[in-house]
Image (tube, rainbow, N blue to C red):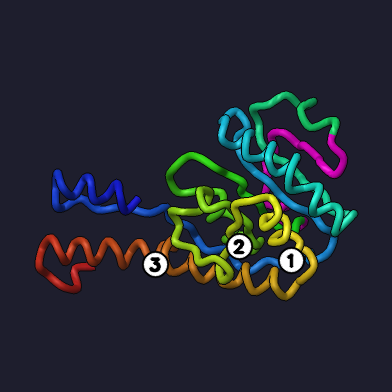
Amino acid sequence: CKENTCVFKAINKNSHTMLPTFSILPKKKMTHQGGKILFIGNLSWRANIEGLGWFVDEVLPIIVDSIPEARLTIVGSGCDHTLFSGYDHVNYLGYVKDIEPLYSEHQVFVTPLFEGSGIRIKILEAFNHDIPVVSTSKGCGTICAEDGKDILISNDEDSFAKSVISLLKSPSKQDNLAHNAKVLLAKGYSISARVAEFKRIIEMQTGQRGVL
């Protein structure tokens, strides 16, 4: 987003980046046990299906070796329902109209992406629903989340699996990561953050303070 803003500012100095905006949800009571991992994404997009395939084939077996009860839930339309039928520890739900209950039923949200750009709204949604996130660098590079504080970032199968395992085995780590991510969301993506941003822009353009 910063790179895009710079391009537009070179054309018009009054260009500004407007970030996605969320009403911050009350903290949810989460289920800390069960070894349940959640993936949400449109599976008609090649990057999603390739990243998910990498996770299922390379990462999930490592997780299951350490936590035999671990199970991946996949939510998303756009692929054949039989694609994941041959996998143990995988539950493909397809399109789900109301995904909100799924967040509190799972312990970790994963975003295994190796290409693409833009802000991953699904990561911000996960932050808002108090579920800790493990992502590749490409999956979360635009949201300014700090590795080890707000999110866990891993780019190879061993470290990605270890990140997921560390969360599944530690309810306190789940809570700490989710709390910090919610603070990040409130500071940068809340309605109050957007109001303050609009106020700064208007004051910058008009030279007047206190116009909002």
Residue occupying image coordinates x 90% and y 54%? 68
The quarter holding residue 132 reads bottom right
Q: Where is residue 180 in the image (x, y as percent from the top left)?
A: 56, 72
Badge 1 crowding class, 10 Å Cα cut-off, few under 14, some 14 to 19, many 20 or more, is: some
Residue 152: give its label: 2
Q: What residue type is labelled 1?
A: Ser
Range shown magenta: 87-105
Q: Do the residues under discs 1 and 3 have CB atoms within 8 angstroms?
A: no
The residue under label 1 is: 166
Residue 192: give its label: 3
Residue occupying image coordinates x 53% and y 49%? 139
Residue occupying image coordinates x 16% and y 66%? 203
Sequence order check: which comes first, mark 3 or mark 2?
2
Q: Do the residues under discs 2 and 1 have CB atoms within 8 angstroms?
A: yes
Q: What residue type is labelled 2?
A: Leu
The quarter holding residue 66 reads bottom right
Secondary structure state at the residue bearing disc 2: strand
Which residue occupies the foreground of this view, 196 or 146?
146
Q: Where is residue 61 in the image (x, y as percent from the top left)?
A: 81, 47
> Is 197 situated above or below 110?
below
Residue 195: within the magenta?
A: no
Sequence order check: which comes first, mark 2 or mark 1?
2
CA–CA distance in space, label 3 to label 2? 27 Å
Residue 73: give its label: none
Q: Which amino acid does label 3 sit on?
A: Ser
Q: Position of residue 96 (x, y in %)?
A: 70, 38
Residue occupying image coordinates x 85% and y 31%? 86
Which residue occupies the foreground of this view, 190 or 41?
41
Residue 92: within the magenta?
A: yes
> Is 204 situated above or below 41?
below
